[in-house]
Image: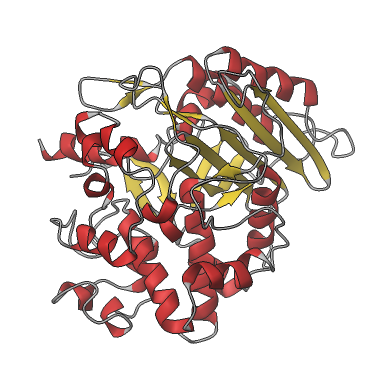
Amino acid sequence: MATRRFVRLRRFAGTVPVAAALAVGLTAFAPPAQADPQVMSFDAAKLRVTLDATHEAGMYGLYSAVRQDDDAWKGASGVADVRTRRPVRPDMQHRVGSVTKTFTATAVLQLAEQGRLQLDAPIAQYLPGTVPGERGQQVTVRMLLNHTSGIADFVRFAFPSLQRLSPESLDRHRFRTLRADRLIKWGVESPPTNAPGASWAYSNTNYIILGQLLEEVTGVKAETYIQKNVIRPAGLKKTYFPTEPAIYGDHSRMYEALYRHAEPPREYSVFNMSWIGVAGALVSTTDDLNTFYRALLTGKLIGRGALTEMQSTVPVQDANGNTLMNYGLGLYSMEMPCGTFWGHDGVVFGSGTQVLSSVDGRRQLALGFNLTKYQQLDGQGAPTPNAIDNALGAHFVQALCGGKGPLATRSPATSAKPPLPLQFVTRP
């Protein structure tokens, strides 16, 4: 019973069903052979075909940016508005959800580099009372970053109707403003998912606390610090924390299907994002996201020592102890047929994102789409893959492993079968 409850709550915790496409796509496409690095590094025609196939499978609209060194491809398929049939475009702004966590983690690692905080210090040392009692002395900054704190997610309290698969609370609270201390209180007052450091359990509460940590150490608002010390140094032009419910740049509408329980899917492109803050509120573009991860992985935002810490992972395991992926400090690694890739995925209501980069930052994919939770649920409350996932998987494999150029460095641990997405983790 506890396992099933965990799956039900994890469906809304901030990571995307887009990773489910990898579980299907990678088993259907053989790894391509290495070839002459002087030849074109990816097949634009096949990228176009796989992107269009995803729209034809039922995705309203999606946009993708692929890079190999200085070569780049961008594409979009489908519609940004199902009523007017306005088309999506590659450079649209997009809510990136939990991809925000990599930005927040980078800011924390910068402060650790400067000696202004310690990763293995208890959070009570910096924020007394935020995590009450003995647990505040046990939970470290590192545990917040890698989701091993055991602190529960607050999302089910912020939007309680989601537990009965109803969009009622989303509609009612679209314009509500939530303070960080309210979000944290929901999380820390809920029963812990595990003892501090004992296992991995994804929780947005961890990153709201990290936002408070940034403010305590720097004396400025967390979003302001991240904008000045992470977003600007990375050279990003269209990445920002929204201050109002609307996105004013060119963007798609965002449709939430709620596992077929919102028919037709609700439109949530206008939404007060204080409910997720530095855990998932960023707006960005696919180009900016690729630029950010390349800057991060090549040492332009944090030094090699801090990056090594960031890439020190804990296993994400299913109920049977099988490792599905490896989560570091605000980013994770996934095995593809052609090697190991680093990045993050994210979802907010109606908006999904996946970003993956080779370890050297040379080969990259950033993808956004505008229809979320389009799957149906099985008897255990887990999403079941459908035609959209198959098509997305084909596009991911083509983007990261296809073409004739140099591919990501192959890892000895590379498996032909990818890990399952985070929302399928069933640890109680």
Identify which residue, 264 or 425, lies in the foreground: 264
Q: Is residue 13 left or right of residue 356?
A: left
User: Which residue: 51% across, 79% down?
Assistant: 111
Q: Position of residue 47 (x, y in %)?
A: 72, 25
Q: Which of 98 and 273 is in front in this view?
A: 273
**Residue found 48% across the figure and 65% down from its top:** 105
Answer yes or no: is residue 33 visible: no
Answer whether residue 420 is visible to the viewer in this image: yes
Colour mapping used in the image? secondary structure
> In the rendered view of the protein, which quadrant contains the N terminus?
top left
Q: Where in the figure is residue 143, as x and y percent of width and height?
A: 33, 66
Q: Report whether 363 appears left or right of 40.
A: left
Q: Which residue lies furthest to the left in this view?
A: 1
For residue 313, above or below residue 215: above
Task: Reply above or below: 360 against 306.
Answer: above
Above or below 304: residue 49: above
| Rendering coords of residue 43 (x, y %) | 78, 26
User: Where's residue 53, x and y in %?
Assistant: 62, 15
Q: Residue furthest right?
A: 38
Figure disc tally = 0
Q: Quadrant of residue 189?
A: bottom left
Q: Quadrant of residue 428?
A: top left
The residue positioned 70% from the left and 38% from the top of the image is 65
Above or below 46: residue 287: below
Residue drawn at point x = 22 percent, y = 72 percent: 131
